[in-house]
Image (spheres, rainbow, N blue to C red):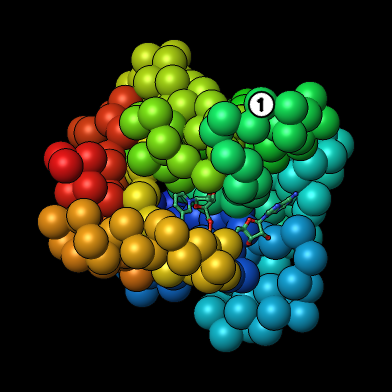
Amino acid sequence: MEYKLDNKQNDKNKKRVALVTGSTSGIGLAIAKKLADDGFIIAFHSKSSISKGKELADSFENSSYHQADLSNSQNTRKLIDDVLNHHKRLDVLINNAGISKTIAHKNLKEASPDIWRELYEVNVIAPWILISEAEDALRKSSKDNGTSCIINITSHAGVRPKGASIPYATTKAALNHMTKLLALSLSPDIRVNAVAPGLVHTPMTASWEEAHHLWRERAPMKRGANPEEIAHIVSMLVSNTYITGEIVMVDGGLNLT
Ligand code: NAD
């Protein structure tokens, strides 16, 4: 790792830094805003909305913006270097960026190997690279203040046999399992948890009419979630100092029906 830790930045009273991937829209943006409200300096990230990212970084004190295509392993590694070079520390990593593909579960041939690889690259391999590159910095921050953590944004589709497609659901199940395995491997310095949303009103789901109908009809809460409701749970998991290895389902109770 190329960055050098600045001793002044090790001061417990210095503001902590959170990297939120995919934070220029949807759930990631809501998480970044909530963590900024909680007092974090935010490292914003996106694949392509560069001007929006820079605008966001300018509107939150000491925050930064970093562009990286997480389907490219080299770019993914460089993202952590960029954040550490800029802020000299990292306390919280939120693996939120993700992609989906809608394919009927019975239509096996449409779920081609290329689609499997594309989804795995962004939804599973990128979080793994980011975590492994961030490990040293997160352990270091943990020694300063005992609160380093990683939160993976997975999906209820990674817990129940449901979801936009079998490849998508499988990537989220993999990320849920990775969460538990890493909670063991990285303890006690770094807590690792996942938040598994059901339907959330974001650009990704704007055209998912069937899902919106399902949540209105069947979910005990009678609606999908707002991104802020997911961000609230993330903030709770970040502020807690004990919880690790948990997959927190936030689906308005749909899994009960
Ligand atoms: P969104 O499309 O608004 O956000 C996805 C983010 O991922 C974007 O900021 C985008 O820049 C980033 N991203 C996508 N591909 C990328 C790549 N190759 N490199 C870098 N960044 C990339 O969608 P959202 O609904 O806010 O989704 C956020 C996360 O929540 C995803 O992991 C998604 O799977 C998960 N999720 C969403 C829902 C839902 O109903 N919206 C439900 C369960 C889980």
- Looking at the image, residue 209 lies above or below residue 145: below
Q: Along the horizontal axis of the image, is 45 left or right of 142? A: right
| Furthest-front residue in this view | 106
Q: In the image, what residue type sits under mark 1?
A: Leu
Q: Is residue 218 visible?
A: yes
| Residue ID at (44%, 21%) | 177
| Residue ID at (19%, 65%) | 222
Q: Quadrant of residue 58?
A: bottom right
Q: Nearer the viewer, residue 57 or 234?
A: 234
Q: Nearer the viewer, residue 173 or 218?
A: 218
Q: Quadrant of the C terminus?
A: top left
Q: Nearer the viewer, residue 142 or 117?
A: 117
- Looking at the image, residue 60 lies above or below residue 205: below
Q: Quadrant of residue 71?
A: top right
Q: Position of residue 228 (x, y in %)?
A: 34, 69
Name the residue that disc number 1 marks: 108
Dot 1 lies on which element?
Answer: loop
- Looking at the image, residue 6 lies above or below residue 169: below
Q: Is residue 133 visible?
A: no
| Residue ID at (18%, 49%) | 253
Q: Position of residue 217 (x, y in %)?
A: 23, 61
